[in-house]
Image (cartoon, grey):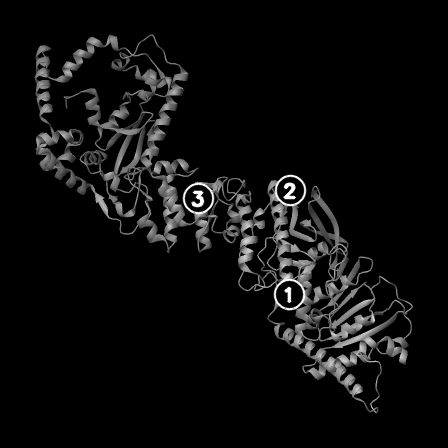
Amino acid sequence: MLGLRSVWRSILRTDIIVPEEYEMTTYKERFEDSEQKAHTQNIATKILRELSALRASVEASSTARKRWVWELLQNAKDVNIGGTVKVLIEADLESATPHVTFRHTGQPFSAENIRFLIEQISSKDRKKDSSGRPKTTGKFGTGFLTTHLLSEIVTVTGIAKEDDLTPRQFQLTLDRRGFEPDEIAAAVEGARRSVLDLDQRPTCKSYVPGAFNTSFRYDLTDDTGRNVAKAGLEDLHACLRYTLGFVREIDSVALPQGTFALQTRIPLTEGEVQILQVTLEREGQKHTRSMATLTQGFTTVAIPVARLNGTIDIQPLGAGIPRLFCDFPLLGTETFPFPVVVNDPNFNPTDARDGVFLTSTARVNPQSTENKQIVKAALSLYLLLLKHAAEHSWENLHRLAAAHPIPSHLTWVDAAWYKNEILTPIRQALLYAPVVRTAKNGERAAILSADGNKYIWFPSAAKKELRAGIWECARWWFPHCLPQQSDVEVWHNLIWEECGQLTTTQLAQFVANMKTIVTLGQRLTDKKVNDWLNEFYALLKSDESEYDTLINHQPIFPNQNGTFRKRAELFRQAGEIPDALKDVLSLLGIDIRDQLIAAGITTDIDELQERDQAWVVKEITAAVHEKATDRTHAKNHREAFKKLLLWFREDTARANRLFPALYQHKYLLYDDDEILDSIERSEQLGELLQEFDVKNVQELRNIISSKTATAQLLPVTQEIIARMGITSIEEWTEALQDKDLAALFSHESTPTTDMFVYAQSLIVKAKERIIEHLRNIETYDLTDMDETAPTILAGITKAGQSVMIVTRPAYDGEVIIYYGSERDVLDYEDSELWIDDGKNVRRVTMGHMLKTTEIRRFPI
């Protein structure tokens, strides 16, 4: 009996079991008895304190619910045999007797192991081996108590084996159901006594080292236990690939769903970057999960990856993945804002294993100092991984940019230290690495240009819909400086102050910087500038917080000169205002086009005042009366007066109606020199009429034409054919039946088919340019347009009135009206002749024809 007590002395901390009838007669005996009671009471108090905290947090803390499986895995790893251990987890959560049983193939229990397990004393040894790696991660300390969240009663089955003793099988019950220290103390004492007869039990002849000899069974008696089991198993599925990659001692982990094992390590570049493949074998099928790793010393960084079309595709790390591992996940570091997972067995974790000490104190703190050195080593590895991934065009590089400041709840980190020593170098490297897939065919670009200027502009706004609208507007302008549409929301959560943030305010500033609508239009791709601007204004209106400021302070609205102006500087044009009158007013010193918002801008800008034809007439009348009275001063405005007179001649009825007084006194618009010149020309014309014995200018012109006809014969060219609007040889033959027309052309030149093909292309080109031009004039409506002839457009309305239009190319500066249908059309009052001279599309008025042909009189 004394031999038994000698072997298990470490369990009971006493040499003799004292019978109840034995009376202590010495102080020494009483001291020893009180020492044992105090030891048991301390153990019970400690266990109860830890259990109470766990019981209180199990419902609210997801971390507490997950920790049990990792504590058991750590214990299995620490008792590996020959550097390897296998784990089998049996989990039945739905049957009438639900349970979780954890088995492993590790070393048997020593007497000290059993005592520490009963008393919940940690046998954790932070001593390191010859390579500097910690010998154990931890065993049977307070962390093991988290497994009691599964069940407060644990049945431990195993083999007791000391080097000089034969192996004996035992079964031990750990009962933590008590809520008072005495209850826990009694359970601890009961567990001690249950193994006192171990020497008397038969030798375990069936013991085989490396078999599944050790098991921990947890019967799940309530919903809490089942929920804890489910949470731990789910976390195991999420994080096990990392642990298998970091902890080489764990050979495999078998679960009801299949068996996880590390399959291969594939070096990518000179052995520096590796791809680790972990397989899940289920029902004969293998499923592979991969991660890229980079290791230096004991520090490893890792990121999940997949192979996609021959390249590496970085996978989401996942919000539920701890960022720090001490071989096993430190649950609670999921929000540690490092872009990749960091593992180092030399980390010094907090007691709850929910972080590592990275604080700064006035006194020396070796643990924190070592942890900081590890994180800085991880930073160096991260920068190498980023460089490698960028150079080899890995997909989804933005997932390496998930770096942020330390959140306030991570009290175990010095936020200032992290920002200066870790976050700033990460972001500085990201600014110049090609980590952004752009909207231009997915090309990669860096956030900043080589000279440090902002290159990529990330849509930024309070609402997702607004960010999408900003991207949609900007993609027509600078897609090479935008992230891909699918990445907009990802980058919105990643960018920081050095990144270009494309707000509605910034986009408006870009528009204002263009100065003119022409410059902006040149920057847009496959988008009409007016359409783009209207969409842009609609976008601004959707940004309620910035709308008023933007439209009132930014020059972003084009006037009719094409220059961007502020809203307060502009008016909306009401009705038609003839371009000639706008020109006159501008020459008189009031640039009305500078004040009027451009045609085609349809956005509803609130409270924009109007300018109409009546206002223009009033301003012209007032200016002319003021400037024409002083004849000396009037010479300075000769161009304005000439243009107004010309318009008076071109549109007599309208001029008389709009400017009755000025029209009646239009002599005020002539200067003295012009009056004298007109008198002199009139006298010369009278002399010519008398000399040739004719009554009018037309008769004089006929005489002159007849005398010069021979010298004016025209060669038949494709330009002349186009000028006439003729598109085929048949039409040409018919045209020559007009003797007056035939007399104009040389009979030595004959048109060819190619001439008519070319002429037809010029006619079509001119017509298309004229139609496009008319569509951009607000007063013209081409909705019901119909082509009644190759050069005649009908169904057009102008300011609500029907109008017919003759189109004609004038690329060599002349037009020949040949077709009778064209002459008939132009004979109507509501008809117009429009030409394209290759540079400009413009209307040819009667006044223009009279002026250029110098016809001053003609028969009615």
Q: At numbered mark 3, what does the secondary structure look like: helix, strand or loop? A: helix
Look at the picture and state if 758 lies above or below 526. Answer: above
Instruction: Name the residue that disc number 1 marks.
Output: 350
Kind of residue sitting beneath label 3: Ala
Instruction: Name the residue that disc number 3 marks.
Output: 474
Q: Are marks 2 and 3 in contact (CB under 8 Å)?
A: no
Crowding near pointer 3: few (<14 within 10 Å), some, many (20+)? many
Q: Quadrant of the C terminus?
A: top left
Locate residue 84, reporting x and y percent.
80, 57
Crowding near pointer 2: few (<14 within 10 Å), some, many (20+)? few
- For the image, the number of numbered tags is 3
Q: Is residue 24 left or right of residue 838?
A: right
Cα distance between the residues tagged 2 and 3:
30 Å
Front of the two marks 1 and 2? 1
Q: Earlier in the sequence, mark 1 or mark 2?
A: 2
Q: Earlier in the sequence, mark 1 or mark 3?
A: 1
Instruction: Name the residue that disc number 2 marks.
Output: 309
Residue at the spot 14% in from the left edge and 15% down from the top edge:
699
Q: At numbered mark 1, what does the secondary structure look like: helix, strand or loop? A: loop
In this rendered view, identify the residue nearer to me: 690 or 536: 536
